[in-house]
Amino acid sequence: MWTDTHVHLNDERIYPQWREYVERAKKNGVVSFFVVGYDWESSLRANHLSIFEGIYSIIGVHPHESSSPYVDELDWKSLVTEKTLAIGEIGLDYYRLHSPKEKQKEVFSRFIQFAKEVNRPIVIHCRDAWKDLIDIMKAEKVWEVGGIMHSYSGSYETFKLVSEWNFLFSFSGPITYPNAKNLREVLKKIPLEYIVIETDAPYLPPQSCRGKMNEPAYLPEIAEKISELKNVSLEDLSIKFRENLKNLFGKEI
């Protein structure tokens, strides 16, 4: 049994047929889904989907959306329910700079503070912004909430630092890509107790599905690659991932 710890069933390309995506995933052993918000509307959809069995919400603002007016104007606390596992995805993305760096940093800090207020972990997105990200994490004492580094692409040295702050590291489709040798070398060094998996669907399909829209049914391919790299059976891997999530969230997922 697998948990997709980061999936966008709330994406407008998937949302109208979300039940079909979930049913296909369940046939492949994926039984739990963390639906991650990236703006206000997607967080509302995540909240709605979480009323269904096996589906949990994560609410927040992707760094690309940091400059949007609703970030400041709307009542984010109203979206927090018993099935809201975390605040995210939040963080920094300097690759395309859809929002200015200073605004991204401001919103990232504010949502870490919000996570503390509602007593939830955080889910972090980072691209080409590791130094600023770590600086803010230190300043905001993220170890008080912990969380998940989404679709981890950082170094082993960054792992060693952040792993001390009660974080898990989620791996997705890119670990199956032929040119991702460095990422696989990092994963090999990370102990299993820090690892979980995700699809980030509809983004980042695994290698066998490149060119297609990703979906949670493809999650086992990521598990199979980690099983191979770590020389651990799929059954033991599934058990370990569930233990890791229980340790972070304090309950069975």
Image (cartoon, rainbow, N blue to C red):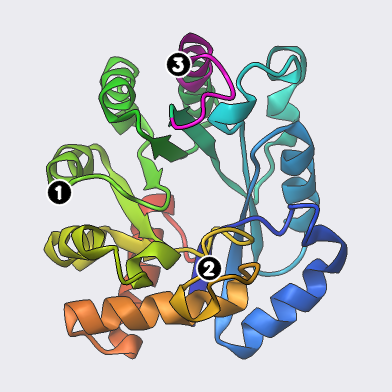
Q: Residue at x 50, y 37 (%)?
A: 120
- Where is residue 17 shown, x and y percent of the image? 84, 69
Q: Main secondary structure of the magenta part?
A: helix
* Left or right: where 60 falls relative to 45: left
Position of residue 63 relative to residue 4, above or below, is above
Q: Residue at x 65, y 51 (%)?
A: 83
Q: Quadrant of residue 218?
A: bottom right
Classify mark 3: helix, strand or loop: helix
Position of residue 139 relative to residue 149, above or below, is above
For badge 3, the amino acid type reads: Lys
Label 2 vs label 1, nearer the camera: 2
Q: Residue at x 36, y 83 (%)?
A: 224
Which residue is at the far right? 16
Q: Which residues are magenta?
A: 95-109
For badge 1, the amino acid type reads: Tyr
Position of residue 212 relative to residue 82, above or below, is below
- Where is residue 1 shown, x and y percent of the image? 49, 83
* Left or right: where 229 falls relative to 218: left
Callouts 2 and 3 close, C-beta under 8 Å: no
Name the residue tied to disc 2: 205
Name the residue tied to disc 1: 156
Classify mark 1: helix, strand or loop: helix
Task: Estimate the spatial distance between the alpha carbons at disc 2 and disc 3, rounded to whole Å.
Answer: 29 Å
Q: Nearer the viewer, residue 202 or 195?
A: 202
Compare marks 2 and 1 and give the one earlier in the sequence.
1
Q: Which mark is residue 105?
A: 3
Q: Residues within 10 Å of mark 2 (few under 14, many from 20)?
A: many
